[in-house]
């Protein structure tokens, strides 16, 4: 191991002399206490090192020891349910070691070295080994079977010996090859290197989030990338929390990146008590948290998203669907800007380094649906919050992010001010996954696409009419157009608004989503027919069934959609009782 001497300290960026022969991105233990750092630039024997811990009081002349390997995460059973900082130090263990404020230089084991896991071998002596070979399994949680698969860096060969079924810790050898290599339940992978896998596939299955505006109007596919841009307090974190809680991914990696500590506290206190609708188990049993809050070192924030995505890729390679939430990528970009400034690099737009778009692209590129080395399907879906200052979407982070994601859920300040939540704008948002997903939904529920088109059409017509209403008021419009306004109101209040605080409505099953929209659009069709048959609009406006439809989202439970036909019949009957309607003729 090479030992050098610190010659310059500029915040978290230091210069070390005597590092000749060290590798770019090698880990360095710096100073008397051995703070973790990473070489980010090499010039002869001078290395520029970025420090991941608080290095106040660091002095020149202190030693720095190059570890000779890049910054890596430890992968293995026990990751699920963990809470790590940006460089995968387990926060609860650190707290026990150093008290409530993290002491610099304190390290903890990312995975519990003493815990025994029940291993079932899948190989026997003489079997081939190499990339993608499944060598055994461990039940990590009730719903996650930890498949031990050899990674892309494994040389091809044959197994000379395989451990028998039994309980072992993570450093116990489970397979030995004829070439003498040993494989355990844990392994390491450099965070900045995407884990190699088979070919990328076109995303074709939806990530069902339980949020109506997302699932029906702007859906995301498993393996897709989405951005949630929004000004201060418009609901980025709430939307990410809602998706992390209710989406149908097998695992969630939640990266709290430079945001307030209390937002992570919400996750920590709330998630363990919530039940995953898919498995009926605690949500923490499918969640991994990476917390790097605003008061933690800025360089660790920069690396936290790589730590998170590497863990996600590891489970993807077992054949799972993993969803990564990053809140907020703007704080990450700010970390990049701060570090770049200290490196005295030439700034580009708004002081961000010229490589900002390249780094964003690299991050989102790690999402995708893939064929794993084993030949299974797995995916990493990435959902990144973007916090443009002043809600101005023309700033560089939002603009560049837009180029690399195919789903854009734009949060609207006016909607948030009007307490219309989620404040996702139906005018500015889009999803380019719709065409890929229509095929999937056609096989499950063909109504999905036709309802989505009809709802979008009404919202579009309302947008045009709103201009006229602003000029001359609603009374001047013909009844047919006023009905469009009425239905759009129903869509907004009864369908698009969804409170994360409503016990029933915080999660809306796909069946219930379709049913609520079907009710609204049935109302619209019946009303159109009734008006043609002579029923005046005020009579329709005063129908009690209207408020019943608006209330459906909190009165109809997810397990009550079997009564859907009855509700639709009740809507038709209301029109029949009002004197006219399509009952009998249309149904
Ligand atoms: N879906 C929702 N249901 C109910 N309330 C919501 C919802 N979304 C947002 N809110 C309200 O908006 C407030 C702000 O939301 P949130 O903290 O998610 O905003 P943010 O965009 O993350 O803010 P910041 O820029 O400070 O990070 C919440 O405290 C909550 O009251
Ligand atoms: Mg937030």
Image (cartoon, rainbow, N blue to C red):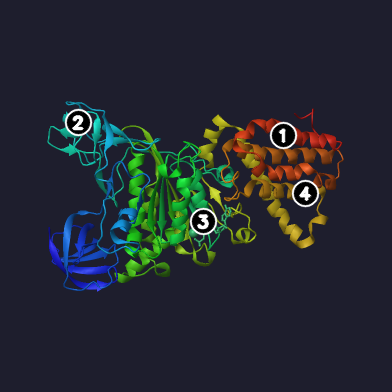
Residue 560 seen: yes
Q: Is residue 21 above or below residue 9?
A: above
Q: Quadrant of the N terminus?
A: bottom left
Report the residue marked by disc 3: 236
Q: Is residue 546 above or below residue 563?
A: below
Work out how far the residue at label 4 is from the one at label 3, CA to CA, in angstroms: 34 Å
In the image, the residue with mark 3 has its CB under 8 Å from the nearest atom of ligand 1: yes
For marks 4 and 1, the one nearer the N-term is 4
- Judged by depth in the image, the label closer to the viewer, 4 or 2, is 2
Within-10-Å neighbours for mark 4: few <14, some 14–19, many 20+: some
Report the residue marked by disc 1: 568
- Judged by depth in the image, the label closer to the viewer, 4 or 1, is 1
Work out how far the residue at label 3 is from the one at label 2, CA to CA, in angstroms: 48 Å
Work out how far the residue at label 4 is from the one at label 2, CA to CA, in angstroms: 74 Å
Contact between labelled residues 1 and 4, with CB atoms less than 8 Å apart: no
Report the residue marked by disc 4: 481
For marks 3 and 1, the one nearer the N-term is 3
Report the residue marked by disc 2: 163
Residue 153, position as x, y percentages in the image: 22, 41
519 and 427: which one is in front? 519
Within-10-Å neighbours for mark 1: few <14, some 14–19, many 20+: some
Contact between labelled residues 2 and 1, with CB atoms less than 8 Å apart: no
């Amino acid at each position: 191991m090479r030992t050098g001497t610190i010659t310059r300290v500029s915040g978290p960026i230091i210069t070390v002399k005597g590092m000749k022969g060290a590798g770019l991105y090698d880990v360095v233990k710096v100073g008397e206490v051995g703070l973790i750092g990473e070489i980010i630039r090499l010039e002869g024997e001078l290395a520029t090192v970025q420090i991941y811990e608080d290095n106040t009081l660091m002095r020149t002349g202190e030693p720095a020891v190059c570890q000779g390997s890049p910054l890596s995460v430890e992968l293995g059973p026990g990751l699920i349910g963990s809470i790590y900082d940006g460089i995968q130090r387990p926060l609860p263990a650190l707290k026990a070691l150093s008290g409530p404020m993290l002491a610099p230089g304190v390290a903890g084991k990312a995975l519990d070295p003493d815990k025994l896991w029940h291993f079932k071998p899948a190989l026997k002596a003489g079997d081939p080994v190499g990339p993608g070979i499944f060598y055994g399994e461990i039940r990590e949680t009730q719903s996650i079977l930890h498949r031990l698969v050899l990674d892309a860096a494994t040389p091809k060969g044959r197994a000379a010996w395989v451990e028998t079924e039994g309980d072992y810790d993570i450093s116990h050898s489970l397979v030995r090859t004829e070439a003498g290599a040993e494989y355990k339940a844990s392994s390491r992978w450099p965070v900045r290197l995407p884990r190699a896998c088979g070919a990328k596939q076109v995303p074709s299955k939806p990530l069902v989030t339980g949020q109506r505006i997302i699932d029906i109007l702007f859906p995301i596919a498993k393996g897709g990338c989405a951005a949630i841009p929004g000004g201060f307090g418009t609901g980025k974190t709430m939307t990410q929390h809602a998706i992390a809680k209710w989406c149908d991914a097998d695992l969630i990696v939640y990266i709290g990146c430079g945001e307030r500590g209390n937002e992570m506290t919400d996750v920590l206190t709330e998630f363990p008590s919530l039940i995953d609708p898919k498995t009926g188990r605690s949500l923490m049993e499918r969640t991994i948290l990476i917390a790097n809050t605003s008061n933690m070192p800025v360089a660790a924030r920069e690396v936290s998203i790589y730590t998170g995505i590497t863990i996600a890729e590891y489970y993807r390679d077992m054949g799972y669907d993993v969803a990564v939430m990053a809140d907020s990528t703007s704080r990450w970009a700010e970390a990049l800007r701060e570090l770049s400034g200290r490196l005295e690099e030439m700034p580009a737009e708004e002081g961000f380094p010229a490589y900002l778009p390249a780094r964003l692209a690299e991050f989102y590129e790690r999402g995708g649906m893939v064929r794993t080395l084993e030949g299974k399907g797995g995916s990493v879906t990435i959902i990144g919050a973007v916090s443009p200052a002043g809600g101005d979407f023309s700033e560089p982070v939002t603009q560049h992010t837009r180029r690399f994601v195919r789903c854009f859920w734009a949060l609207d300040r006016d909607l948030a001010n009007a307490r219309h939540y989620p404040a996702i704008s139906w005018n500015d948002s889009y999803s380019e996954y719709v065409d890929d997903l229509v095929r999937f939904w056609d096989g499950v529920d063909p109504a999905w696409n036709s309802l989505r088109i009809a709802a979008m059409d009404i919202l579009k017509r309302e947008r045009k009419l709103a201009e006229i209403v602003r000029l001359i008021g609603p009374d001047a419009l013909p009844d047919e157009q006023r009905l469009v306004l009425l239905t759009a109101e129903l869509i907004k209040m009864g369908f698009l608004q969804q409170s994360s605080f409503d016990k029933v409505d915080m999660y809306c099953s796909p069946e219930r989503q379709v049913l609520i929209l079907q009710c609204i659009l049935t109302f619209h069709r019946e009303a159109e027919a009734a008006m043609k048959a002579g029923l005046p609009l005020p009579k329709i406006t005063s129908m009690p069934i209207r408020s019943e439809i608006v209330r459906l989202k909190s009165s109809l439970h997810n397990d009550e959609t079997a009564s859907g036909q009855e509700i639709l019949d009740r809507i038709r009957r209301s029109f029949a009782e009002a004197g006219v309607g399509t009952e009998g003729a249309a149904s």
